[in-house]
Amino acid sequence: MSIPPPPGPHQPQDAQGPYPQGPYAPPPYPAWGQAPGPYGRPAPVNGIAIAALVLGLLCFLPAVGLVLGLIALGQIRRKGERGKGLAVAGAVLSSIGLALWVVSLSTGAVGAFWDGLKEASKGEGTAYSLAKGECFDAPGGSLEGFTYDVDEVPCKGEHDGEVFAAVKVPGGSYPGDEKVTRIADDKCYALQHTYAMDTWAVPEDVDVYYLTPTRQSWRLGDREITCVFGNSDAKGTLTGSLRNDETTLDADQVAYLKAARVLDTALDSAPEETYVEDDLPGHKAWAGRVASALAEQAGMLDGHTWPADAGKPLADLVDDLNAAEGEWADASDATDVDTFYEHYDKGSDLIDPHKSVTARKALGLATTPPSYEEEDSGDGGGTDAEV
């Protein structure tokens, strides 16, 4: 369950979430959206990689284009420069030109050539090749700006990012940077909970990032938004996979977390007006949604058959949820601000995150609420906290 930011003077006025969006510009590469922070200047693009791409596109001196592509890849690896995707593309296009010569001279080696060409054209080592559950390192370690090159690495070690979802943008003309960013914000922030269901198990220095199409990459067929977990510190990394969903959790853990998510969603629907005094009808409607979510969550938990050692903690939790439902329902019927606060405060206390620690421990889930959820605003309030 979650404790919402208390309305009115009970909460700090800064209600912004931790996931701001990043900048967008027109280079012909996908663009990262990100949390704010000072990041370093990106590494330069290898000039030989550009030359290899030009020769490949023009089908001029294909052997030279292929050699330049291979040389560029070696230099990029040694110097840490950008342009791996350009070098690969140049080498692939030049290989096609050479293939025409091979076909004209001999058919015996054509089959082996095309097998290699298919592997090269899959986009290995590029941002377009990222798939859900994969971890990678980005050029310079930065998830800011524009990128094409990535290096897939094992999730168990240190890495810059972990892909948790991919979203297809409808075709047609390019919808514009603002709309693409809005889609990425809406989809990625919502989908993070389907990949990392136990929010308590996600480190506090993890933020949501996304790789989006640009106007130029759209022309090349790029229609995918890639949602990524990364470190909020530009110099920081991730270690180990953050994935905790149906593929890694047991049925009891999934059942608990799905029920908890119902309440989280309702609490996240608080009105834009911070103070109840400024929008009593809006806060009453919100309290009604929370009361309904509490009833649904309690029903989901009560209807599940839990392991023997988890039965008592879950039953106690259901009792608290049922009591909280009554208080939130009374808040939704309040005729004045003071009455709203009276029931709101009681209802919030009943869904304090610490009340679920025993149940979580019995189910083998994380038992330490994120510290930012425990911070007190100095007047009895707190911030959003799933239980």
Image (tube, rainbow, N blue to C red):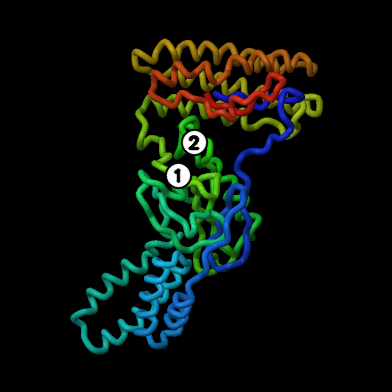
**Observer-nearest of 85 and 214:** 85
Q: Quadrant of residue 254?
A: top left
Q: Amino acid at mark 1?
A: Leu
Point out residue 55 in the picture as x, y percentages from the top left corner. 44, 83
* Quadrant into which the N terminus falls: top right
* Number of residues whose C-alpha sits closer than 10 Å to that of mark 1, classed few (under 14), some (14–19) or many (20 or more): many
Labels in figure, total: 2
Left or right, 104 with reference to 225? left
Q: Which residue is mark 2?
A: 203
Q: Are marks 2 and 1 in contact (CB under 8 Å)?
A: yes
Res. 289 visible in picture: no
Q: Which residue is mark 1?
A: 238
Left or right, 210 with reference to 175? left
- Element type at marker 2? loop
Residue furthest to the front in view is 79
**Observer-nearest of 264 and 304:** 264
Q: Amino acid at mark 2?
A: Pro
Point out residue 127 in the picture as x, y percentages from the top left corner. 45, 59
- Checking the image for residue 171, the label placed there is none
* Number of residues whose C-alpha sits closer than 10 Å to that of mark 2, classed few (under 14), some (14–19) or many (20 or more): few
In the rendered view, would you say 17 is above or below 336?
below
Q: What whole-number distance in Å separates the C-alpha atoms at marks 2 and 1?
A: 9 Å
Q: Which residue shows up at 39% across the image and 88% down it?
A: 61
Point out residue 99 in the picture as x, y percentages from the top left corner. 30, 82
- Element type at marker 1? strand
Left or right, 30 with reference to 286? left
Residue furthest to the left in view is 108
Res. 312 visible in picture: yes
Q: Which residue shows up at 41% across the image and 35% down it?
A: 244
In the rendered view, would you say 319 is above or below 353?
above
